Amino acid sequence: MSLPAAAALLLLLTVPLATFALYSVLTAGLFSVSGPLTLENYRAALGSSLNHTLATNSLVVGVATALISLALGLPIAYWLRFAAGRWQQFVLFLVVASMFASYLVRIYAWRTILGDNGVINRALEGLGLTSQPLGFLIFSRAAVVIALVHILLPYVILVLFAGFRPMPVAILESAQDLGANSLTRWRRIILPLMAAPAVTAFLFVFVLSAGDYVTPQFLGGTRGSMLGVQVQASFIEAGNWPLGAATGFVMLTGFLLCYGLALFALRLTRLDRVRWS
C-alpha cells in the first residue's frame, strides 16, 4: 500500500534533488552543462562576498518572519481553540480562504500600501506628520518581512491550532483551580506543551521565507535582496545552471543545519518529551 506514496516521493523529490546534485558538479555553459566534474561551482558559491551578504539577509528575514508569525499566530490559535466558541469554524474558514488569495496580488497590495504614493505615506502627509514620502517603508528588509508575515501567518495559525486541538480544557482549569494565573499557565503548561508544534511552525516559515525569491524582487530592492534571488538569477538570467544548483544546495545545507539545531535544542531542554494525556 505504501508503494504509490514511495514512488511519488521518488519522482517528485529524489529525482529533482539528484539532478540538481549532478548539475552542481558539472561545468557550466550558456544555459547548458557538460563535463568534466568539478567543485568549482561550490567554491564560487561559498567564496562570493555577494552571496555572504545575501545569505545574511536571508537569515535575518527568515528568523524575523518566523518569530513575528509565531508571536502573532500563537495567541490567535489559542483563542480559536479555547475562546472562539461558535465563531471557531467561521474564523477557521477565513484563515483557510486567505491561503487561496493570489501570492502576487498580496505582494502588489503591500507595494501599494508601502510605496511613496501608498496609503501610509498619503495618510501621514494628509495628517501633516510628514512633508515628503517615507522612502524606507519600501524596498527594504522590513517590507519583505511584513509581506511574508501576511502571506505565511495562516499556515502558522493552522499548525498551532492543530497542536492546541488535542489539549484538554481540564488541564488549564485544573491549573487555575490550583492558583495558577494566566502568566503561570502560559509559562508552565501551554508553552512547554506547544514547544514541538511551535518549532515546526517556526521552521516551516523560516525555510519558506528565507528561500523566497519573488517577494524580495518586488519589495526588497537592493537592501532586501536575498539568496534565493541569486539562485533564480543564475538559472534564468545568467544561464549558469551549475552555479545556481550549487548555491541552492548550499542553502539546503543551511536549512538542514537549522533543522538539526532546532531538534537538538528541543532534546536538550527535553521539551520534545512533554505530552498531555
Image (tube, helix red, strand yellow):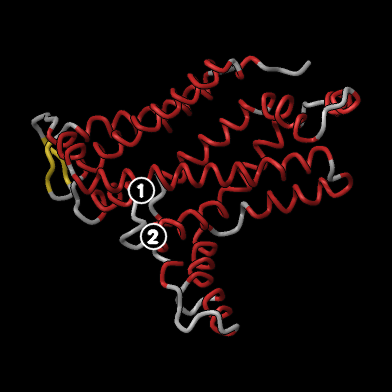
The earlier-in-sequence mark between 2 and 1 is: 1
224 versus 157 height, above or below: below
* Left or right: 238 in relation to 181: left
- Measuring 83% from the left and 38% from the top, which residue is drawn there? 82
Instruction: Identify the residue shown where x is 72% and y is 25%.
Output: 188
Q: Quadrant of residue 81?
A: top right
- Disc 2 element: helix
Residue count near mark 2 (Cα–Cα under 10 Å), binned few <14, some 14–19, many ≥20: many
Q: CA distance from mark 2 to mark 1?
A: 10 Å
What residue type is disc 1 on? Asn
Residue at 72% across, 41% down: 77
Relative image position of residue 151 (x, y in whole percent): 56, 53
The picture places residue 223, in percent across and down from the top left corner, at 33, 59
Looking at the image, residue 120 lies above or below residue 144 = below
Residue type at the position of mark 2: Gly
Q: In which quadrant will I find the N terminus?
A: top right
Q: Which residue is mark 2?
A: 220
Query: For the C terminus, which image quadrant?
Result: top right
Q: Position of residue 24 (x, y in %)?
A: 21, 34
Q: Is residue 66 above or below residue 186?
A: below
